[in-house]
Amino acid sequence: MQIFATILTGVAVFVLGQIVLKWLIEPIQNLRIEISNIVYLLTNDDSIIHHANIVEKEQALATSKNLKMSGAKLIACQQLIPFYEQTSKICKLPKKDNLSNAANKLSSMSKTMWGKESETFYLLSLYRIEICEDLGVSDPVKDNMSKQELIDNIKELRKIKRNTN
């Protein structure tokens, strides 16, 4: 009888462990993997993102598509985590709104990289910094410009543009 209880307890512990693993731990790991993929994309394709108009069109299109897909995957990964608000606090994950903001900025970045405006370069760097802030990771590309300097440069270029028109 004791052997049966031991076997039953072992099976119950195994089943509960698998439920926790598949329902909670794996989705959290998938979100963290997607965040690291975004950091990789922002680092690896930085020159393509900033020079989409002069690199090979196929490369630029692929990078643009990857930016959009990464934003969508970020939201999809978040949706799989049960009780995200509570889980994010316990596991130190980005807030739900921050993930949504990062996804929107990735999409905006994919559109902005084709711009020919003078502030495009600064705007893309600002998006990268804000995406990293939203995801709670450090900026993988150091441009020697702070977020505030980028904002100031964008404002100045827009002011100059208004005055010349």
Image: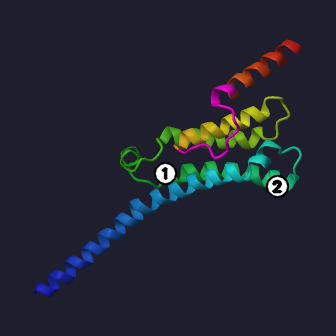
Vertical arrangement, residue 2 with respect to residue 96, above or below: below
Query: Three-letter amino acid code at disc 1?
Result: Gln
Percent position (x, y) of residue 26?
A: 45, 63
Residue identifier under label 1: 79
Q: Position of residue 127 (x, y in %)?
A: 67, 37
> Which percent across, then down, holds residue 146?
65, 31
Report the quarter where the N terminus lies: bottom left
Q: Residue at x 79, y 29 (%)?
A: 119
Main secondary structure type of the part rendered in magenta: loop
Q: Nearer the viewer, residue 79 or 94?
A: 94
Residue denoted by label 2: 59
- 17 left or right, relative to 44: left
In the picture, measured across the screen, residue 145 lies left or right of residue 131, that is right
Frontmost residue, 100 versus 88 = 88
Image quadrant for the C terminus? top right
Left or right of 17 in this view: 74: right
Q: Secondary structure at mark 2?
A: helix
* Residue 93, percent from left and from top: 45, 47
- In this view, 64 is above or below 3: above
Residue at (26% x, 72% y) in the render? 13
